[in-house]
Image (cartoon, rainbow, N blue to C red):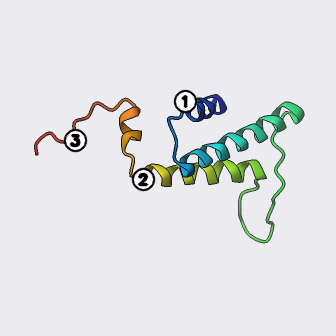
């Protein structure tokens, strides 16, 4: 479902900024990678296990999802194009009371 939403956002050009687009591509790629593991093996294969420190076990797809999500958050917070918020269906009037 996430991959379909990302593809919709990209192909309808709702996200045109390269940072926003690439962050969504990262999320979609990670989701597809984890989906492939689930279909082939029934579970997600984790490959990075750092025994020398107490840290979660993860795989490359997890890195893509996490990096993409963090970059998308930066894109939303730092984007000069504030229509991202209005396209989400917000009817809040920011000029009220001014």
Q: In this view of the protein, which residue sits in the foreground, 68 or 83?
A: 83
Tag nearer the camera, 1 or 2: 1
Badge 3 or badge 1: first in the primary sequence: 1
Residue at the location (67% across, 40% down)? 28
Residue contact between numbered discs 3 and 1, judged by CB atoms under 8 Å: no
Give the side of residue 60 with respect to residue 26, left or right: right
Q: Quadrant of the N terminus?
A: top right
Give the percent coordinates (x, y) of residue 56: 72, 57
Alpha carbon separation for disc pair 2 and 3: 17 Å
Residue 59 visible from this viewpoint: no
State the residue at coordinates (76%, 55%). Answer: 57
Relative to 21, say whether 74 is above or below: below
Q: Which mark is residue 12?
A: 1
Q: Note whether 65 is above or below 55 in the view shown.
A: above
Residue 94: give its label: 3
Report which quarter residue 94 is drawn in: top left
- Pick whichever of labels 2 and 3 is earlier in the sequence: 2
Spot occupied by residue 85 in the image (x, y as percentages of width and height)? 38, 39
Within 10 Å of disc 2 (Cα), the crowding (few <14, some 14-19, many 20+) is few
Asked if 37 appears above or below 74 in the picture, the reply is above
Q: Relative to 77, is 8 on the left or the right? A: right
Which residue was labeled with disc 2? 77
Q: Is residue 75 left or right of residue 4?
A: left
Left or right, residue 12 beside residue 37: left
């Amino acid at each position: 479902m996430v991959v379909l939403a990302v593809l919709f956002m990209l192909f309808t050009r709702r996200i045109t900024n390269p940072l926003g687009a690439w962050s969504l591509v990262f999320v979609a790629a990670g989701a597809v990678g984890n989906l492939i593991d689930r279909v082939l093996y029934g579970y997600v294969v984790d490959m990075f296990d750092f025994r020398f420190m107490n840290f979660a076990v993860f795989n490359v797809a997890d890195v893509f999802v996490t990096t993409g999500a963090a970059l998308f958050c930066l894109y939303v917070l730092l984007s000069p194009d504030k229509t991202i918020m209005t396209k989400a269906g917000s009817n809040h009037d920011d000029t009220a009371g001014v």
